[in-house]
Image (cartoon, rainbow, N blue to C red):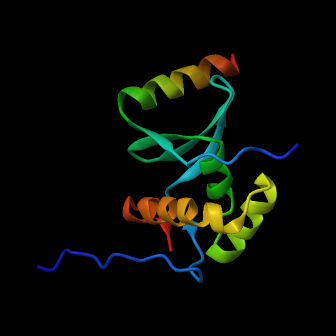
Amino acid sequence: MKKTWTKPTMCQVAAGMEMSRYLSAELKAKK
Amino acid sequence: METARTRAIISMQSRPKLKHHARLQYDPVRDAWALLSPERIFWPNEVSLDILRLCDGTRNVEEMIASLADQYGADEADIADDVTAFLQEWSDNMLVTL
């Protein structure tokens, strides 16, 4: 089935807080 | 000292490529793809992700639009503006080279 075209968007998050959350979530997932 | 840089303007012959410091990575926790760059993280929607995946420096914009139109069963003319505006925006944000 073909996908539906929508306007391309990107949600930007400044690193710092988000990066530490991202890395801790990644580490938890590896355990 | 001259610090201003020349703004790259997209054309159908541009061959967009992700900057070397930006990479796409799958996040199993969120079950989503993230675009990681040193100081910022981006969460692209499905269409953005498909555009970014084609940014490998081998295809020009015209070929990218044709490929996306095929993937989405859309008319090339209907999606061309979205694709070029997206690539221009992320070139201006220094994530993509044109």
Residue A1 visible? The answer is yes
> Is residue B95 found left or right of B73 in the rendered image?
left
> Is residue B15 found left or right of A14 in the rendered image?
right
Task: Give the quarter of the image for residue A12.
Answer: top left
Give the camera-side residue of B2 and B15.
B15
Residue with the most extreme bottom position: B13
Which quadrant is the N terminus of chain B positioned in?
A: bottom left
Coordinates of residue B50 in the picture (x, y in percent): 68, 52
Residue at 42 percent of width and 28 percent of height: A18
Residue with the most extreme left position: B1
Task: Give the quarter of the image for residue B69.
Answer: bottom right
Coordinates of residue B95 in the picture (x, y in percent): 46, 59
Coordinates of residue A23 in the picture (x, y in percent): 52, 28
Give the camera-side residue of B41 and B45.
B45
Rendered view: B59 above or below A14: below
Residue with the most extreme right position: A1
Coordinates of residue B27 in the picture (x, y in percent): 64, 32
Give the camera-side residue of A15 and A31.
A15
Residue at 21 percent of width and 75 percent of height: B4
Number of numbered tags placed on the structure image: 0
Task: Give the quarter of the image for residue B3.
Answer: bottom left
Residue at 33 percent of width and 75 percent of height: B7
Rendered view: B43 above or below B49: above
Residue B55 visible? The answer is no
